[in-house]
Image (cartoon, rainbow, N blue to C red):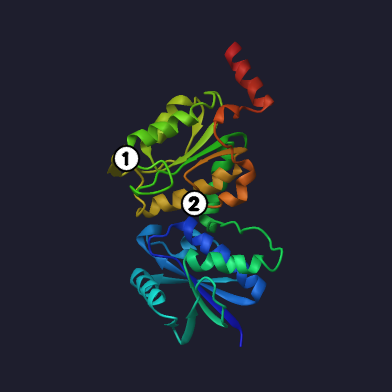
Amino acid sequence: MARVLYAAAPEWAGTWHRFRVINHVKTFADHAGYRVYFLWGVTGAVSWCRYEELLSPVPGVEAINVSEPEIRALEKAAAGSKTIRYGNRSLTVYRDGGRPGDEVFAFDLSAADPLERLARSRAALPGPLRAIPAADIGRRAGVCIRDMDLRRRVGIRVRVSECRVDWRKPRRFQRELDDTVKSIVRIPWHVPVFVVTDSEYVQQMLASHFHDTKFLPKRFTEKDSGGRYVDRHDRESMLTFLAEVMCLTSCRKIVNVGGCLNQESFQAKIVDPPYDNVVLPERSMQNVNGAGRR
């Protein structure tokens, strides 16, 4: 009988969180010989989008779209039982320190992380997978990469957490937003940038500093302290975000504040603070100087 591994993430988990779960269980499954099914919650955290509307298939992983109530029920069942029923299968709930059986259910990172560590402790395995946006999103991003000449730009990603208690900063507090902006505008004004943020205030402040700023148009419809924000339940905003991520990875250097989907794949491009050392390539600097002389 073929080994199978079902995995899922909580209803509140966004794309970055969900793909981390997929990455971890896929690493384990490839090493131990399991077939992977990922139960994708069609919830507000992903604007009620189905998996295939956002992401391309991951080889060896079959995504199954399930409703928000189903995800809640699975989480509750996994927390209170050693086995759960899914379809006609009885799945053993995996917990850290346990031994995986032939039919396993791994809920969230608390199960996916130790499964990956179990595999990596026994073999040298490849690095993390990169989430590839769905074809329509990829085509849109490709046009933007070309038309905005993103490969010569510095990408700036600022994720503002809506959670008041969160280790990730900035949160939706004016002081934290201002501190973040101050740290970034240490980059010289003449550096061409591409901005990805869910805060209208952050986008406006950065655009007022950098004289050559590009970003994808989107709607900031949610009012909160510190200004207006992208509504995470808005479908068009979710599609735009995935195009932004693809655009961001094409930039020559990246300032990454608050985390981002696929950040493991562009780690070599990430610039650590302080950002004073982010400068233009010599050819682009000559263009700026030439423009100044004219």
Looking at the rendering, in which quadrant would you find the N terminus? bottom right
In this rendering, position of residue 125 left or right of residue 208: right
Tell which of 248 and 274 is nearer to you. Answer: 274
State the residue at coordinates (51%, 28%): 212
* Residue carrying label 1: 228
Instruction: Please tell me the numbered disc located at residue 252.
Output: none
State the residue at coordinates (52%, 70%): 96
| Sooner in the amino-acid sequence: mark 2 or mark 1 | 1
State the residue at coordinates (50%, 69%): 111
State the residue at coordinates (55%, 62%): 56
In this rendering, position of residue 226 left or right of residue 263: left
In this rendering, position of residue 261 left or right of residue 205: right
* Residue carrying label 2: 242
User: Can you give x and y, in whole percent of width and height, for residue 181 in the image?
Assistant: 43, 31
- Label 1 neighbourhood size at 10 Å, few (<14), some (14-19), many (20+)? some
User: Can you give x and y, in whole percent of width and height, for residue 41 in the image?
Assistant: 41, 67
Tell which of 249 and 36 is nearer to you. Answer: 36
Name the amino acid type tagged 1: Arg
Q: Which residue lies furthest to the front in this view?
A: 97
Looking at the rendering, in which quadrant would you find the C terminus? top right
**2 vs 1, front mark:** 1
Q: In this view, does 144 lie above or below 120?
A: above
